[in-house]
Amino acid sequence: MAYLLMFVILLHLITLAMLFIATMEKSWWVWDGMENSDLWYNCRFDNSTETWLCASSKETEWLQAVQVLMIISVVFSSVSFLVFLGQLFTMSKGGLFYFTGLCQVFAGLTAFTAALIYTLHKKEILPDSRDLTTGHFGYCFILAWVCVPLLLCSGVIYLHLRKKKK
């Protein structure tokens, strides 16, 4: 039981960290390694100063939807972890972690929706000045997609997890 508990906590912390990185880092779309775009900024590498020059992304309805859904996903997963820790010490023996599991499932569904919107509407989200055929999805976009099954699996594990009776 201790190994299962450690596995669940570790899985939750890993997915929470990956979700946070996917939301905050600047690599959802990359053009030739010299320019990238994320949920918040469009950045370009300046060779003369060897620094990244960033400007706020153009606010479109689709981009705002992705931003909100990714933030909600992080919030659901964070709340889920805090509730799990609270339930671990206060819940009666034999109780189930329903609320924790539902929060994780909702976090997975909101991350899924955000990544799907970004996939389907990248032409409306990304800057108009660049040709999308010269770019590709960045690692943060891939992290968001990897988080989806991990969040859903951990949510299902929490739904079936029962506090051990002694």
Image: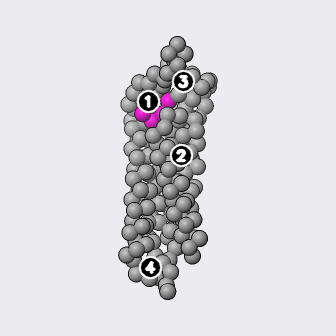
Disc with the residue nearer the chain's start (1 vs 3): 3
Is residue 144 magenta-colored? no
Distance from Cα at disc 4 to Cα at disc 2: 31 Å
Q: Secondary structure at mark 3?
A: strand
| Spot occupied by residue 99 in the image (x, y as percentages of width and height) | 41, 68
Mark 1 residue crowding within 10 angstroms, few (<14) / some (14–19) / many (20+): some
Q: Which residues are magenta?
A: 37-41
Mark 3 residue crowding within 10 angstroms, few (<14) / some (14–19) / many (20+): some
Asked whether residue 54 appears in the rendered view, the answer is yes
Disc with the residue nearer the chain's start (1 vs 2): 1
> Which quadrant would the N terminus be assigned to in this image?
bottom right
User: Dot 1 corresponds to which residue?
Assistant: 41
| Spot occupied by residue 106 in the image (x, y as percentages of width and height) | 45, 58
Disc with the residue nearer the chain's start (4 vs 2): 4
Considering every residue shown, the one lying at the far top of the view is: 48
Disc with the residue nearer the chain's start (4 vs 3): 3
Per the rendering, the mark at residue 144 is 2
Q: Is label 4 in contact with label 2 (beta carbons under 8 Å)?
A: no
| Spot occupied by residue 24 in the image (x, y as percentages of width and height) | 45, 40
Residue occupying image coordinates x 54% and y 70%: 5
Q: Secondary structure at mark 2?
A: helix
User: Dot 3 corresponds to which residue?
Assistant: 35
Disc with the residue nearer the chain's start (2 vs 3): 3
Distance from Cα at disc 4 to Cα at disc 1: 45 Å
Which of the pair 34/111 is nearer the observer? 34
Q: Amino acid at mark 4?
A: Gly
